[in-house]
Amino acid sequence: MTSKILYTPIEAYEKLNNGDALLVDVRDAEDFAQGHIPGAVNIPEMFTTLSMTTPEGLEELKNTFVPLFKNAGIRKNQNVIVYEDSLSTRYGGSCRGYFQLSLLGHNDVGIVDGGFSQWKKDGLPVSTEVTETEPSDFEAELQLSMLATKGDVLSALSNPRVKLLDNRDEDEWRGESSSPYGIDFAPRKGRIPGARWVEWYQFMKPSDEIQHLKSPEEIRAICAQVGLYPEDDIIIYCFKGARASNTYIALKEAGFTHVRNYYGSWNEWSRSPELPIHDGVLAA
């Protein structure tokens, strides 16, 4: 797997022009139709699909995305660069796309830093043409070292060497809402016991327009405030693995070496009534 994850729009444009990369847009089909990066393919399911981490859930993940990746023409050893509006406009949907492709074994995946918003701000071309693709023979090879399953998280509750990081929005962490999709979208509200909390926005530079990750030094300092360090064994969770993917990349960029994404996250955990939660509202 390549070490470079973030590409400036100019870098992505150069690779696109040289035929060295395929760009994947995770936005809604309607937004894609109104304007997108020339030559990009649209896979909105990368943002919308909910997945579980049981063996059956991972099999369903493969059955969902392998055909989509084949139809998009994604080929082995091809550089694929994913984008959304910015890095936070769809709860880190481009980062989730990066994680999905990497988890399923694609070894050269990146993200447009600043997304389509930065692309347009930089004055790069926009197209409304439908991209014609030739189907590929994409095959999945699960990279389980990136992933934390429900069972892994349950085991971590009794293992002090593993640290859980909850990076959901504050109302979810406080147990006031079950998800970004509605207060009662998931059956239970609360937190996984023992998790530390850093809201995912904290890892991005403050901006009302276009989001970028903070510097590695700033990210390490934020983590240190809650007792997380680059050598730690860390499992990140959110609601469906999107914001966790955003933070996963932030920590990787900052030199954290053993980070996993609990991809099923609260959507999965809250639906298993036998799993423990802390459900009391925290004091402000």
Image (cartoon, rainbow, N blue to C red):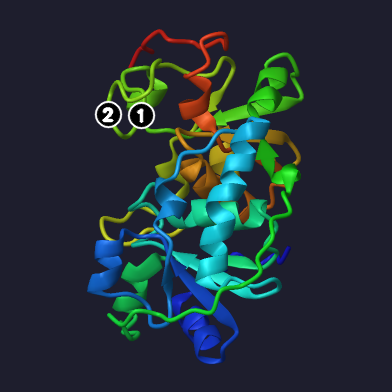
Amino acid type indicated by mark 1: Ser
| Residue 27 versus residue 77 in the image, above or below | above
| Label 1 Cα neighbours within 10 Å, binned few <14 / some 14-19 / many ≥20 | many
Q: CA distance from mark 1 to mark 2?
A: 6 Å
| Label 2 Cα neighbours within 10 Å, binned few <14 / some 14-19 / many ≥20 | few
Amino acid type indicated by mark 2: Gly
40 relative to 7 in the view: left or right: left
Tell me whether the residue at label 1 lies in contact with that at label 2, contact meaning CB atoms closer than 8 angstroms. yes
* Element type at mark 2: loop
Question: Where does residue 60 sit, x and y in percent of width and height?
Answer: 58, 41
> Label 2 belongs to which residue?
182
Q: Which mark, by number, is residue 179?
A: 1
| Residue 176 versus residue 118 in the image, above or below | above
Which image quarter holds the C terminus?
A: top left
Q: Residue at x 57, y 31 (%)?
A: 165
Question: Where does residue 188 sit, x and y in percent of width and height?
Answer: 40, 15
186 relative to 22 in the view: left or right: left
Q: Nearer the viewer, residue 34 or 114?
A: 34
Q: Nearer the viewer, residue 23 or 137?
A: 137
Question: Where does residue 12 sit, x and y in percent of width and height?
Answer: 50, 79
Which image quarter holds the N terminus?
A: bottom right
43 relative to 58 in the view: left or right: left
* Element type at mark 1: loop
Q: Residue at x 36, y 29 (%)?
A: 179
Q: Residue at x 44, y 77 (%)?
A: 9
Count how many numbered circles sit on residues in the image.
2
Residue 92 shows in the view: no
